[in-house]
Image (spheres, rainbow, N blue to C red):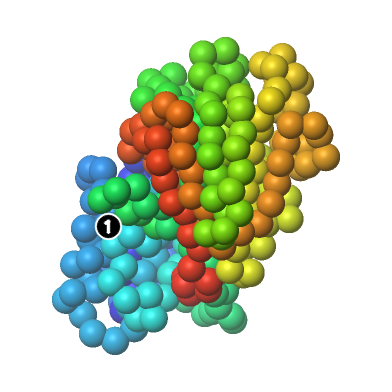
Amino acid sequence: MYYFIVNPNSRSGNGIKIWYLVKNELDSLEVQYTAYFTRHNLHASEIVQEICDSSSGVKNIVVLGGDGTMNEVINGIRDYDDVILGYIPSGSSNDLARSLSLPKDPIKSLKNILTPNRFQYVDTGCVNSNDFQRKFAVSCGIGFDAKICVVTNRSKLKKVLNKFGLGKLTYIMITLKELIFTPFMDAELIIDNKISKSYKQVLFITSMIHKYEGGGLKFTPDANPYDGKLSVCMAHGLSRLKILFMLPTLLFGKHTGLKGIEIFDCKTLDITVDKPASVHFDGEAPGELNQIKLSCTPKQLRIIK
């Protein structure tokens, strides 16, 4: 039995079209499956919790959506040892699929899921703040990159441009706008519970499991989703003009040696900033916080290659 979690609205409605292609293939192969369609925020988490509670043994859960849908799914899993994940990427960014080199073609993805050759056991991250806790599969950021997620998720223009395959224009326009208006932060970091550092004029601090974020930007080119560590990228002490010229280098991961860019690995990271700032995990943005604790759980997800 396969349980499909389908986000019909992923990529501005293309998710349902991709699902019909997958459904036709499943029916032609006479595969036993149940499909669930997400209707509201966090619905995928609720569905997965119900699946985990109502069935015993190993569950084959297939996600058809984007990084945000996958985030909801991994936050709904009760016991990770009892779940095998398949992923048919149909979102706007698909950074998890890009990092794991999963097929872009949905039918090819489906065939890999139905006849798996091997599994990947990949790390997950966790973000905590007071009573708030959330897993993330790709990345968690505070500051500039998170504010872009907040504005993009609310953007009506994104939905329109996605229908014409021009969704990347939304990110570019919002990035330029937020580069002007997102305030700098002062930040205190505690790395692996022992090293304390202070920074002024911080624009963003992004903790990565995988190397890609924001639709293919290589924030941490050497990130390894199998090493049990977070790869952290931060920008500090730079003028907005210098950051503007630095941004294109993120596409190719060529920013790593630039002044004001700091990259390091750690298992845990405590971040305190001087004012509440936007936070995101896998592109989902819950609001503004001024203190978060990040950690990495090694090889927690079992994903079909």
Give amino acid for label 1: Ser
Please provide percent x and percent y for residue 271.
49, 44
> Is residue 147 toward the left or the right of residue 58 in the image?
right
The quadrant holding residue 40 is: top left
Give residue 13's position: percent from left, percent from top.
Answer: 37, 37
In the picture, the quarter occupied by the C terminus is bottom right
Q: Residue at x 59, y 81 (%)?
A: 117
Q: Quadrant of the N terminus?
A: bottom left
Q: Is residue 200 left or right of residue 275?
A: right
Query: Can you tell which quarter of the image residue 32 is in?
Result: bottom left
Residue 220: x %, y % from top left: 69, 48
Left or right, residue 214 beside residue 20: right
Q: Where is mark 1, residue-wise?
A: 45
Counting from the top left corner in percent of width and height, residue 166 is at 56, 26
Element on which disc 1 rests = helix
Q: Can residue 112 be seen in this snapshot?
A: no
Residue 46 visible (yes or no): yes
